[in-house]
């Protein structure tokens, strides 16, 4: 065999060995990938079979649970949906097995999906949605990082609650109770105008705390308002907290100052600082 032929033969052998090595590596990778896929499929089918056996046996989650347990159950059910929709976590409250939902979504379809998922949770007797359709493509989403810090407006209102006398750690609860009671006094159109000036984290504090909260729109006197807004605060402290929180809100929406004053009951107008004839 000539030297040239020997070189060619060695080249062919080397190429064959190289191809075999590549095929071996690719084969191993493919095998590992296939094994992982088979494992995932097996787990999925195992979960489905467990769920099927659970349903066929007639078993189901106990609907007779307390509101706290039911709230945790709803949050658990919504977790996967929130992840798929890539929306901020929905705020869930439960009172007497009635669920209130607060938060921001991108569309009515997303809001309906959240409501329907909540409605079928065992133990839920009703759902009230205060989901706000207004999450824009440019807004920060969970997939883009950690939750943003409280807005300057929210911080301002919480500081006002504290300065008015709310104890450490209760500022948010006091501010929410005052703002939701105040918002209930406003006609729907004016309330909507006010809310457009507020950031999301403050706007959610104006939503009703519980079903039937709209009854507060009939409040007319200052003592009635302060008692309804802060029933668990001593009578001597209520007015100072109310005046401080509503004063902070007034400063945040100067565009609506006269319009809001015009629709408030006469005895409550001093809270809003703007005198209106009549």
Image (cartoon, rainbow, N blue to C red):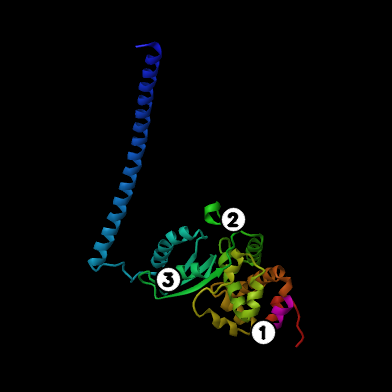
Q: Position of residue 94 (x, y in %)?
A: 44, 70
Cα separation, mark 1 vs mark 3, equals 38 Å
**Which of the pair 104/39 is nearer the observer?**
39
Residue 254: mark in rendering: none
Of helix, strand and loop, which one carries label 2? loop
- Tell me where residue 183 sits by quadrant: bottom right
Residue 116: mark in rendering: 3
**Which of the pair 87/186 is nearer the observer?**
87
Residue 148: mark in rendering: 2
Left or right of 42 in this view: 2: right
Q: Position of residue 92 (x, y in %)?
A: 47, 67
Q: Residues within 10 Å of mark 3 (few under 14, many from 20)?
A: few
Does residue 165 show up magenta in the picture?
no
Q: Position of residue 59 (x, y in %)?
A: 26, 67
Q: Is 25 situated above or below 162?
A: above
**Which of the pair 123/230 is nearer the observer?**
123
Q: Are marks 1 and 2 in contact (CB under 8 Å)?
A: no
Return the disc, 3 or 2, that comes first in the chain's sequence. 3
Cα separation, mark 1 vs mark 2, equals 37 Å
Left or right of 189 in this view: 144: left
- Tell me where residue 252 sits by quadrant: bottom right
Q: Which residues are magenta?
A: 257-263
- Evaluate whether residue 174 shows in this view: no
Q: Residue at x 28, y 61 (%)?
A: 51
- Tell me where residue 199 sits by quadrant: bottom right
Cα separation, mark 3 vs mark 2, equals 28 Å
Q: Are marks 3 and 2 in contact (CB under 8 Å)?
A: no
**Which of the pair 19/218 is nearer the observer?**
19
Q: Residues within 10 Å of mark 1 (few under 14, many from 20)?
A: some
In the picture of the structure, the residue carrying the numbered disc 1 is: 265
Of badges 1 and 3, the one in the foreground is 3
């Amino acid at each position: 065999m000539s030297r040239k032929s020997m070189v060619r033969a060695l080249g062919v052998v080397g190429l064959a060995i190289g191809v075999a090595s590549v095929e071996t590596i690719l084969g191993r990778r493919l095998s590992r990938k296939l094994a992982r896929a088979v494992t995932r499929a097996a787990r999925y089918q195992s979960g489905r079979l467990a769920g099927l056996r659970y349903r066929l046996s007639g078993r189901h989650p106990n609907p007779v649970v307390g509101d706290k347990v039911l709230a945790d159950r709803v949050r658990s059910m919504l977790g996967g949906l929130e992840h798929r929709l890539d929306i901020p976590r929905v705020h869930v409250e439960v009172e007497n097995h009635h669920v209130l939902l607060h938060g921001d979504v991108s569309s009515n379809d997303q809001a309906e999906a959240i409501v329907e998922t909540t409605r079928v949770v065992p133990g839920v007797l009703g759902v009230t949605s205060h989901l706000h359709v207004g999450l824009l493509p440019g807004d920060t989403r969970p997939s883009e990082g950690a939750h943003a810090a409280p807005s300057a407006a929210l911080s301002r209102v919480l500081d006002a609650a504290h300065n008015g006398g709310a104890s450490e750690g209760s500022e948010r609860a006091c501010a929410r109770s005052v703002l939701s009671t105040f918002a209930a006094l406003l006609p729907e159109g004016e309330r909507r105008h006010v809310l457009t000036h507020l950031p999301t984290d403050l706007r959610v504090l104006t939503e009703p705390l519980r079903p039937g909260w709209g009854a507060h729109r009939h409040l007319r006197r200052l003592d009635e308002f302060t008692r309804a807004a802060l029933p668990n605060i001593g009578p001597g402290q209520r007015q100072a907290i109310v005046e401080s929180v509503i004063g902070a809100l007034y400063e945040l929406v100067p565009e609506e100052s006269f319009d809001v004053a015009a629709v408030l009951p006469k005895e409550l107008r001093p809270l809003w600082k703007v005198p209106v004839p009549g």
